[in-house]
Each structure stands twice: as structure tokens, then as C-alpha cells.
Image (cartoon, rainbow, N blue to C red):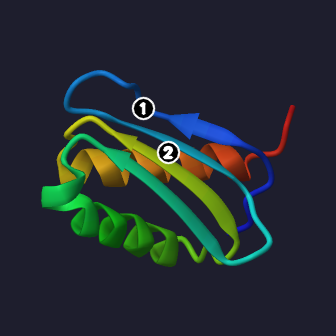
Amino acid sequence: MEIKKKATAGTLESSDIYVMVEPGENGIELELESIVFNQFGEEIEKTAREVLKDFGVNNVKIHLKDRGAVECAIRARIETALKRAEEADK
């Protein structure tokens, strides 16, 4: 999958995650902010990288602002942002 434009998904509400993706040129550049970073930061990053791998994304800047989202929500928000970033402007 090629990231063609900047796209977002999610909110900054409690138990959600805000995801922003944009085209990149230097592999996967991941930035994570989380209220539970010390406890779950590694797992959140692992989940994000798995989704990127599943979609075949090799070059992307991805910013995650987590407010305590569960894994299925993290996956869904990243998938949505990726699909929005792949769509051509109409």
C-alpha cells in the first residue's frame, strides 16, 4: 500500500486513540504518546507495526496519541487512517 496523502482517524476521547498517517520516505517513522506508555507502550507500538506490515506499508510517518484504547480499537483506527490515506482525492 502506498500512502498518498495525510489522513487521520479516531479521537482524543478517553479509551480511544487518534492516528495520523502521512507519506514518508525513510521507512516507518512512528511517534507514540500515551497515557499508559510505561505499561503498554511496547504493545501499542508492536500492534501498530503489525498493522502496517499487514497492509504492506513500508514508508510512512505515523503519529499515535493514545488515551487508553484497547488493541482492537488501535487496529481499527490505524486501518481506517491507512485506507483514507490511500484514496485518491476526488
The dot on residue 37 is: none
Q: Residue at x 70, y 72 (%)?
A: 59
Residue pointed to by mark 2: 80
Q: Secondary structure at mark 1?
A: loop
Q: Secondary structure at mark 2?
A: helix
Residue pointed to by mark 1: 10
- Quadrant location of residue 42? bottom left
Q: Are marks 1 and 2 in contact (CB under 8 Å)?
A: yes
Q: What x and y, as percent, mark residue 82?
A: 58, 53
Q: Quadrant of the N terminus?
A: bottom right
| Picture layout, residue 78 above or below residue 46 | above
Q: What x and y, as percent, mark residue 23?
A: 76, 58
Q: Quadrant of the C terminus?
A: top right
Q: Amino acid at mark 1?
A: Gly
- Quadrant location of residue 56? bottom right
Q: What x and y, as percent, mark residue 2?
A: 74, 66
Q: Is 39 in front, or is 90?
A: 39
| Picture layout, residue 65 above or below residue 37 | above
Q: Is 15 left or right of 2, judged from the image as shown?
A: left
Q: What x and y, as percent, mark residue 25?
A: 80, 72
| Picture layout, residue 29 above or below residue 62 | below
Q: Is 1 in front, or is 13?
A: 13
Dot 1 or dot 2, earlier in sequence: 1
